[in-house]
Each structure stands twice: as C-alpha cells, then as structure tokens.
Image (cartoon, grey):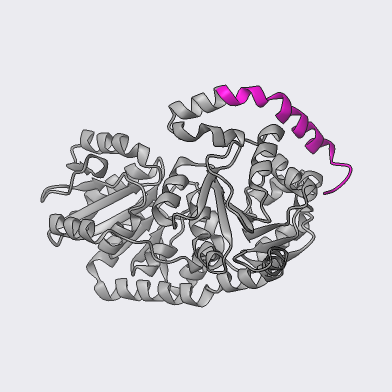
Amino acid sequence: MPSPLPATLRLYRRLASVATPLAGPVTARRLKRGKEDPARLGERRGIASVARPAGPLIWIHGASVGEVLAAAALVERLRGLGFRILLTSGTVTSAAIVARRFPPDVIHQYIPFDAPRFVASFLDHWQPNLALFIESDIWPNLILSSAERRIPMVIINGRMSQRSFPRWRKLRGTIAALLDCFDLCLAQSDADAARFAALGCPAVATSGNLKLDVQAPPADVDKLAQFKAAARGRAVVVAASTHPGEDEIVRDAHRRLATQVPSLLSVIVPRHPERGAAIAQMLSGDGLRVALRSRDQLPAGDTDIYVADTMGELGLFYRLAPVVFMGGSLVPHGGQNPIEAIKLGAAIVHGPHVFNFTDTYAALDRAGGAVRAGSSDDLVAVLARLMNDPAARQQVAGAGEDVVSRLGGALERTLKALEPYLLQMQLEAGGPDA
C-alpha cells in the first residue's frame, strides 16, 4: 500500500469514519425502497450471517447481477480445485441470482458499507486468502484495509470504460494509490488494459471478457412448456433488460409491428422487476391487453404484451424468442450483455448506446451477428425483417454464435494467471482439500 496516502484518500477515510452513524438511516431508506434484505442487514455492517469455512477461502466481489454471473464459470472451476468461495455483491437482485444459480456451498454475503469499522469486522471474520474484484467496483476502505492485511488482490474481467477513464484521470493520484494495492489487473480488452496502465496500475494483462464464457441460462422445463402452450404458436419477440424510457418505445414498436407480424406477442423483461406493475399500468392505460408474470398470469390469446417481472427467468424467454432486443441501448444506459441470448440461438437487435459492451457489440456488428437500430423507426424495420425472414434471422443468429465462440477463452486465461496464487494457497494449506 502506498505511503503516505494521497490527501483525497486520507480525507475519505476520515469522513467515512465520521459518517458511520449514518449507516442506520441510509439502510432504513434503502429498505423502504426494496434495496436491502431485512433479514440480512447486519452484513452491511460487516457482521457475518454464517461461519467461515475451514481451509483456503477465495473472496470474489462483483457489484451486481452482471458481474456475479460473469464469475459463475470461474467459481465452478475454483470449487473443482477444492477452494471455498465467498461471493459478495451489493444488490438484492444479485443475491437472488446467487441463491438460484449457484451451488449451495458458495457463500453469499452483502458487501459491507465502506466504513473502516464495518470493513474491519468483515475482514476479521472472513480472513480471505485471495481477493478477486470483478470489473471495477473499487471501494477505498475495503481495498486499503485488505492491502494493510496483505491479502493478495487481483482485478479480474477488468473494465475501464471510455466514460469513466477521463473522470479517473482527473484524480490520477487517488486511483493510482488504490490500483497500486492490486497484485495484478486482468483486463477485458487491450483498450481496458491501456486505460488501467495509464491510471497507474502496476501490472496489467489482457485476459478477455469472462462474460463471453458464461453458460446459457437455465429454464424450468415445466414452466417453459406451460408458456409455450399458452402462447399457442404465436410469434414472440422479447425486449430484454429494459430501462426507463425504453418500455414506451417497445410499446409503440409493438403497435406498428403487429400490423406486419401476424399474432405477435411482445414480451418485456424489465431490468429491475419492481418496475413491472408500473409498466403494466402504463400499457393498459394505452389500451393494450397485458399479462403480468409476477401475478402468475400467462398470456391469453388476445394478450398484446406480456410483462415478465420476475428474477432469473431470462433463460425461459430467450428460448421462446427467435429475436431479442437488448435493452439499455435505446437510452444512454450503455447496453446489456447479449451473450446469453446468443448462446440460446436468438438474433440480437440493439440500440446505439452500448458503451458498457463496446468491444462485444463492435465485433458482433462487424460480423453481422447483431443488428443496430439507431431509432424507434429502425427498431420496427429491423424487427419486422427478422421476424418475417427466417433465413435472415438465422444468418444473424449464426454469425453471433461464431463471434462468441471466436472471442471466448477468457476463463482459461484467467485461471492461468491466477495459478501462482492458487498454488501458494495449496502449499500453505498442505493441499487444496486441507
């Protein structure tokens, strides 16, 4: 850890200590908004809800759902080597995904608020032997305290976006001091690696994007059959992971598309399921017939739009739709990950705002493995063409699968880079199962 710390970090640490009593009101407000689990509030103060398992423990931290899912294959490989896994994240939705998609021996905890006292309690209990931080969710007290305890730390699937880089460059001394605490940064792309290096990261390598190696999401066989029966062979298009401002665009696109695609059923899967009721109310108010999944409704023969406002069921809807519009891209959110939909054979359509996945979408667009819709008019035209032309649809889907296959391999490169740390842990423990 650098000494002395920059003034910005010294000030941050003092303010975080002084602000510790505010954790109660902050938590209460987040609880009212559905952003905290009332049964697990202690974890936000570093109070563990389960015992630490014996043996070497690898701590993996990701901000939310996307980062947690990116680590799924890595978690499985590390478990296969005999290591115990502690997975932390900061959102209720990510906790639900871990409970649904990960083995029961993977321990999930909410990341503590970044106050020195809470961080110390967290680290005192868990005493991780290795810490892996996914992408760029870097909390100063958490990083500095881990470095003080000499916990080896590695950034995996590192991402430094074009938007974040200029902001961090203005605080280069601050970010350099934090990045200096890491042994290694494994970046998603050469561009990400160059940005991390420019900000002062001492050791950087390009490993690729772990999200390209994720497995296709599962689907409940009975629920899939039930939905297919309810849809009665209708043409289905899915708008996945939509954000505020996009649902209205999808609504308007459905109205126009329904005149060109017989028996069209549009499915909206909001990125945040709690928005489902409001979306359904907006659609119904505009005269559309709507069904809501959170109310255990299935589409009827006259349903126009189905709002799938539940967690962990994208795998089901990707299997139903030959064409998927990836949300977060018609509004300046930065796009959502298209890989899972591609692996289930969908043709991908996206808007212009995909800066969170710049390299992935650029490769897909160049190869014809996804289609860009720059406006609502483009969206209708593209969806109509793909829905009505099976050959064109299959060409896009096939090209997408080829790109994903070609760009994969980040998992193996990441494991190779982590090998020295894993071997050291095994030696210190007398073997991976000790």
> Left or right of 8: which side holds 308?
left
Question: Splitting the image into 4 quarters, where does residue 411 fall?
Answer: bottom right
Tally of numbered tags: 0
Question: Splitting the image into 4 quarters, where does residue 201 fall?
Answer: bottom right
Observer able to see residue 263: no
Residue 313, percent across and down? 32, 53
Residue 39, percent across and down? 45, 33
Pick the front one: 52 or 157: 52
Asked if 140 appears above or below 130 in the picture, the reply is above
Asked if 409 appears above or below 179 in the picture, the reply is below
Residue 24, percent across and down? 57, 23
Name the quarter where the C terminus is drawn: bottom right
Pick the front one: 354 or 380: 354
> Residue 16 magenta-drawn?
yes
Residue 189, percent across and down? 63, 66
Q: Residue at x 47, y 72 (%)?
A: 404
Observer able to see residue 173: yes
Q: Residue at x 12, y 59 (%)?
A: 232
> Left or right of 171: which side holds 376?
left
Pick the front one: 387 or 344: 344
Residue range highlighted in magenta: 1-24
Q: Residue at x 69, y 58 (%)?
A: 154
> Left or right of 87: which side holds 234?
left
> Residue 399 magenta-drawn?
no
Chief secondary structure of the magenta span? helix
Pick the front one: 28 or 198: 28
Asked if 24 appears above or below 162 in the picture, the reply is above
